[in-house]
Every structure is written in structure tokens, then in C-alpha cells.
Image (cartoon, rainbow, N blue to C red):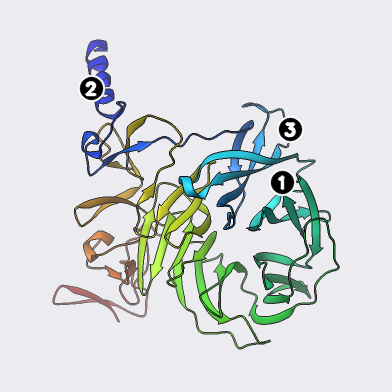
Amino acid sequence: MKVIFLLVAIFSCQIFCQSCTQDYQCNIPYGQCIRSNQSTSAGYCSSSFPGIAIDQSNAGVYYALNCFNSASPSPNDQGNITIRRADATNGGGSATTVFSQQLILGYGNIQRILAAENGVVYYDRAVRPPGTLDLYAYNVQSGLESKITLIPGLFQGYLDIATSTYTCQLLAQNNMFFYDIVRFAGVVGQTGSSTNAYAGTILYSLGNSPCGPLRRGVGSDIIFTAINYTTLMTTFYRGIIMGSDNALPSPYFTVNGVVNDFDVASNGAIVYGTSAGLFKREGNTITNLYSETAVTGVSIFDRNQIIFFNNGVTVRAITLQGQIVQPNNNTTSVCQCKPGFSGNNCQTCINGQIQWNNNNPSCVSYGANGLPVSCSADYQCGNVPFTLCTNQTCVCRNNFRGIKCDICDSPRTLTWRNGIPYCE
């Protein structure tokens, strides 16, 4: 038995532990020949904070992690806030630590990386009292961190440093919470300066719907989101950046899951990250670009590259067409499974479904409702004919519900016509 196991292990390693120069050596289309993403690190990093920002002036990719001095930290070790800079021109590789500060009693966590420009990284931090967020800036060259301003009730933010600051503000009133999309005119202060709280102009009111991330769109558009934490759905809205107290526009589109972050490409395509991976909506088509892990930060570089990082500590890059961009950090390449696949021959799709497009397989993960997060045909949604693939999303037929979409609640009754179920 031991001899057989050893032979199997050697055979598997000959295929997927070997070095390579071309994809055909790696059981295509399930495997691929890639370079490893090696980056310099400080300590042991266990998780990432939301958001990622690219400094277009120097191609720096900035993201934040919680790191420890050892693999088994003591109970009193709260970890260190760590900001790293990777290289957008090298597929998000060559990461180095540019800022590290010890946390004290859990306060001071970076809530979200907001923006980066001209060597300055902008982010918000949680301070005392709990629930208060301050806007900070870190000058990478000088190594100075400064509090720029206090934006009362800052809930989500996006900085367009050249013109205005756009945020979502949270207002508590009579034990109820209300959310507004607010524009603060003027350029954010430079590192080292401090101003009073800005006086903002309300663009849109979302009522009691919690805001998600927001971004400037194409032209005069602003794209913002509202999250329903009961149904775990995110609704996108497309509004304008000017005016005040504008009427809330009709929903642009709605997706399954909580959107952690998104960005808008120059052609208007929206790329967003959820617990199910990375998705692109272009026109009315939604494409699953990456489903290996959850995606918490999304930012677009050089018109056609998407830089993002997952819930671990790895920065990845992918084009709008879905091609992984590999960093050139070492001299060796090895066979690895395509995103989402595993096993000796890279043909196992754990917690997901293998779908084919132009002879290329993808491992599409299942959503909270038990259905694939994207589809191209009804049969991929399971339990046909109760399920349908509509706009590349698996849905139940009208009036049906449940994990298998086969529950028809009274007073409606289940009837069949020509092999199709109806709940009427």
C-alpha cells in the first residue's frame, strides 16, 4: 500500500510539481504554466482590510493588511496595521511594506483604502469613540501620517482628489439610521495639514438602506450602491455628480451578494468583488472573471488591467477580458491549476460547477441560494424546469421559491403545461 501511494504521489508531482515553459505541459485547459507571486513581507499577515488604490502617477498599488510579528501571536498582540505597495506594471507583484503601526486595544484599524495620488495614500481609520472615522493621509516618501479632516458620520468613501470628495454619510435620528450620498467641494488638504469638517451637499438620500462602495463613473456619472443585508443583495445606482437633493434614480442593476468594492472602466464596464469572486458587468452581460476566493478590493489600471486582492494577503491582476496577469518576480515557472480548480489533474471544482465557454472551463462558485453565481444556460442552474438562467443569473420561475425553486405557496397551486411548471 505504501509503495502504491508513493507511485501515485510521484506521478502527480511529475505533472503538477514540475517546472514548465508552456501551458501545454500542464494539462490544458484545466492547468496553466505561471510564475509564482513572490513578494517581500513583514511578519505574518492574516487578513486584509477593504479597498485598494492605484497611484496612476507611479503605478503603485496600495493595500492594507493586519500583520503579526510571529505565526503564533500572544493574546495581547493586536497586530500591526501594514500598508504595502505593489507594482501595477508587474501584475501586482514586487510588494514591499511602506507603513506599519501597532494596534492598541483594537482601535485605529484602517477601515478602507480610499485613494492614492502623487505618492500619498488616503484612508479612513476608526478612532475613539467607536463608530467615528477620521480621514488620514500617508506620504510614502517622507513617511509622515497626518489626519486630514473629520467627516462626520463617514460610512463609505471615495476620494476624487483633483476635484471633490464623495462619501456616504450615516445619520442617526430617533434610534433610526439614514444614509446620504454627499459631495464635499474642494481639494482634500495636503499631507501635514488639518482642516475642520467639510460642509457637504447631499446629492441623493438612500433612506434606511445602508450604502455600499461608491465611485466616479464615466463623464459626469457617479456610481453608488445600497446593500440589503437581509436578502444579501446589492443594488447599483447611476446618478450625476452635481446638484443637490436629487431624486433617487431608478436602480441601474442588482446583483446577488454584498459588493465589497468596485471600479468603473473607461468603457463604462463595472467590475465588482463579492464573497463569490470578481465579476464584470458590461452592457447587460455579467461575467465571472475570478471565483477562487472572495474579493475585497478592486481598482483599474491602464484602461485594461484590473488590480485586486482577495481575503488573504495576495495581490492579483487580471485583464477586462479575464486573462490573469502574472508578476515577473522569479526565474521559475510551474504548472498550477486555473482559478477555482484543484486536484492532481486540476479537474476538481470544489463548492462550484464547471461551466464551458469557447472550449475553456471555469469553476463557477455557488451563491448563498445554492445556485451558481452566473450561468449561460438553464441546465446549469439545476432542478430544471423549476429554474431558469435569466440575464446570466440563475432564478426561480415566477412565484416559486426555495433552494430548489420548487415551492409554490398557498393559495397558489402547482400546475403543469407542456412540461413547464406554473405557480398560479
Q: Which mark is residue 77?
A: 3
Q: Quadrant of the C terminus?
A: bottom left
Asked if 91 appears above or below 6 in the picture, the reply is: below
Q: In the image, residue 259 lies at what x, y percent?
A: 52, 62
Asked if 203 appears above or below 228 in the picture, the reply is: below
Q: Residue at x 55, y 68 (%)?
A: 228
User: Quick one: label 1, few (<14), some, or many (20+) residues within 10 Å?
Assistant: few
Q: Which residue is mark 1?
A: 141
Which amino acid type corresponds to the residue marked 3 in the rendered image?
Answer: Asp
Nearer to us of marks 3 and 1 is: 1
For label 3, the SS is loop
Position of 228 compared to 325: left or right? right
User: Quick one: label 2, few (<14), some, or many (20+) residues within 10 Å?
Assistant: few
Q: In the image, residue 106 lies at what x, y percent?
A: 75, 44
Of callouts 1 and 2, which one flags the residue occurring earlier in the amino acid sequence?
Answer: 2
Of callouts 3 and 2, which one flags the residue occurring earlier in the amino acid sequence?
Answer: 2
Q: Which mark is residue 11?
A: 2
Q: In the image, residue 101 lies at what x, y percent?
A: 75, 40
Q: Residue at x 60, y 36 (%)?
A: 45
Q: Quadrant of the N terminus?
A: top left
For label 2, the SS is helix
Which amino acid type corresponds to the residue marked 1 in the rendered image?
Answer: Gln
Q: Residue at x 59, y 33 (%)?
A: 41
Asked if 67 appears above or below 150 in the picture, the reply is: above
Q: Are marks 3 and 1 in contact (CB under 8 Å)?
A: no
Which amino acid type corresponds to the residue marked 2 in the rendered image?
Answer: Phe
Counting the numbered discs, the total is: 3
